[in-house]
Image (tube, rainbow, N blue to C red):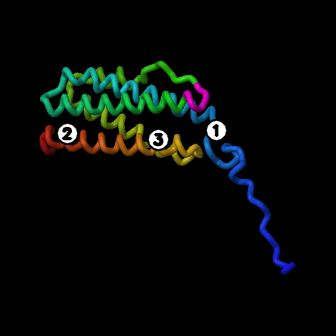
Amino acid sequence: MSGERASPVCYGAEADDIYMGYAGRDELLAALNILLEAERAGARVALESVGDATGPDHAAMMRAIRADEARWCAMLSRQIRRLGGTASRKCGAFHGKAMAIADPIERLAFLNHGQAWVVRKLADLTRRVRDDALHADLRRMAESHRINIDSAAAFLGETRPAS
């Protein structure tokens, strides 16, 4: 024996998620369902806004946003089921608030604020997600929303008069 002392075995990888500072299953399911309801609302707003579009570029953007929101609804539903939960069937209150805005350009700006809210919620949540597959999906969702935000902001900058 060399007299060297060995470090004790670390069992951190086997520790409970909550103990390690990660979100527990119930907290994750609640957060994912809130996001799902928000995405469903965004998808409906985008779909219903196609007919109010100010032109073909605006309509195309609304269709693209709707498709993206629907994609993330499917991912969130899939992850909720994988975690043993039940996906909410509700549509978030955002839908009613957005559709109360008659001007399609102002509604798009409001939708963009909603997309930014989702990005902030995803940033808060991903820091607390230990599950690699869920973490990767949530990061992809956030990046996709950032792209939508930038695209809508560019469109809004082109359609609004300079202040």
Quarter of the N terminus within the rendering: bottom right
Q: What is the secondary structure assignment of the residue under circle 3?
A: helix
Quickly name the residue at label 1. 24
First along the sequence among labels 2 and 1 = 1
Which residue is rendered at x = 36% and y = 31% of the image? 69
- Between the C-alphas of marks 2 and 3, the distance is 28 Å
First along the sequence among labels 1 and 3 = 1
Number of numbered discs present?
3
Q: Which residues are magenta?
A: 81-85
Which residue is rendered at x = 37% and y = 28% of the image? 70
Quickly name the residue at label 3. 137
**Which SS type dominates the magenta stretch?**
loop
* Residue 158 pos. (x, y %): 14, 42
Q: Is residue 49 magenta?
A: no
In the rendered structure, the answer to whether residue 49 lies left or right of residue 33 reads: left
Q: Which mark is residue 156?
A: 2
Q: Quadrant of residue 4?
A: bottom right
